[in-house]
Image: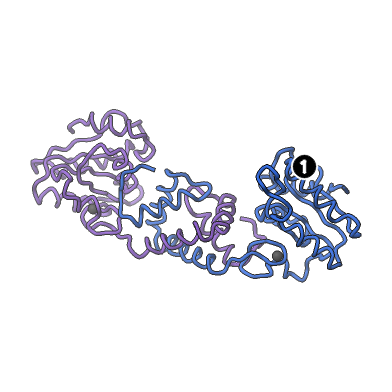
Chain colours: A blue, B purple
């Protein structure tokens, strides 16, 4: 950001905040702000309203950890979903990516990250205990661990597999298609579909 | 956009609107929405507020055509500006670009586009008459026409020069540094500074 003020503080503040949106930098933020200002009625107003609405209504699903405007979330409260399968993901963005791929009509569970001793992230910092409770409550035949193909992701997968051992549930993981070191969120739908279809037992 | 709904309507609407922001596409919009939702207190809320504030307060400056939260705008009401020079630009984005370059402590005039007979844009669709009035009011020694180096831009520059002929004002244009066919908004500050410094008389 230039330190030179080119407009009133409200516009400067808008540019400053837009620059924090992923995908926009300081220069893009200025262009975006100007575009929004020019389309005040058609875009800026509705966007302001949609954001305020999201602030009011968005919450974390108490069942699965997804974010939505209802709790339980749309996926947890969908009666047509297969209750016997839970797909475990690191982050909501992975859940969204798998849902867009539309390859699994299952339930989900969002871990909220991966085990990372170096960063001080232990099992209690994730929703692993809640996952174990969901499985203990019965009716779950398979847990598909769909974490990123990183060392932390695989460590987390192994930890969860250990926690679920002896509970009579099949634990599988994504297999083909996920590039080593890659992140689910960036994969195309075909790759995600192949990875789910070829999942293997731990 | 996928037609598959992955969350409540408020989140879908937020994604849909974010996808219309320049710099963001449908995929970036989803990532941006999720980031904003996760940073609800630090970013989404403040951004919603800043946007609502901009909707309320932004207006077009009745003097120069800039957009700002005051009318006259910050530049028109700045007593330290040189009243004797008016820099004429096509668009507010060009004004902002020149201001960021910080090379001219003058007044501005935003045309709102360029003459374009094929698109049905004539002199009355731009703020040319208002520019002539500003010059006629006296005190202006020089008008710097800082339009894009496009055919329409140059046609517009010539038209304005004709309109100002005989009014005792020097009309200059940007010279060195502006690539042919290029747009001011994308140039670096050094190029803009050089172009202003080497301006030539029509
Ligand atoms: Zn849920
Ligand atoms: Zn003004």
Left or right side of B128 for A71: right
| Quadrant of the snapshot with the N terminus of chain B | bottom right
Tell me which corner region of the image, top left, top right, bottom left or bottom right, holds residue B140.
top left
Rendered residue at 23%/50% (across/down):
B75
Q: Classify B2 as above or below B82.
A: below
Q: Residue at x 36, y 55 (%)?
A: A11
Instruction: Using the image as rendered, state which of residue B45 and residue B72 is in the foreground.
Output: B45
Question: Residue B172: horizontal and vertical position, in percent?
Answer: 19, 35
Q: Which residue corresponds to mark 1?
A: A177
- In the image, A89: left or right of A83? left
Exactly how many numbered labels are in the figure?
Answer: 1
Q: Quadrant of residue A141?
A: bottom right
Image mark 1: chain: A
Q: Residue at x 74, y 45 (%)?
A: A153
Measured as percent of width and height from the top left, residue B20 is found at 50, 55
Using residue A54 as the reference point, say whether residue A197 is left or right of it. right
């Amino acid at each position: 950001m230039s330190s030179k003020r080119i407009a009133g503080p409200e516009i400067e503040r808008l540019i400053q905040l837009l620059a924090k949106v992923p995908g926009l930098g300081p220069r893009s933020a200025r262009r975006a702000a100007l575009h929004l200002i020019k389309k005040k009625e058609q875009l800026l107003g509705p966007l302001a309203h949609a954001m305020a609405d999201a602030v009011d209504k968005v919450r974390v699903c108490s069942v699965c950890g997804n974010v939505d405007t209802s709790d339980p979330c749309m996926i947890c409260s969908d009666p047509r979903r297969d209750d016997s399968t839970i797909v475990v993901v690191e982050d909501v963005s992975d859940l969204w990516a798998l849902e867009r791929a539309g390859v699994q009509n299952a339930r989900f569970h969002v871990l909220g990250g991966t085990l990372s001793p170096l960063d001080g992230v232990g099992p209690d910092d994730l929703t692993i205990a809640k996952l174990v409770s969901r499985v203990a409550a019965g009716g779950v035949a398979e847990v598909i661990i769909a974490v990123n193909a990183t060392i932390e992701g695989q460590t987390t997968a192994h930890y969860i597999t250990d926690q679920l051992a002896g509970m009579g549930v099949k634990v599988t993981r994504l297999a083909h298609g996920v590039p080593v070191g890659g992140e689910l969120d960036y994969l195309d739908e075909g790759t995600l579909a192949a990875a789910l279809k070829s999942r293997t037992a731990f």
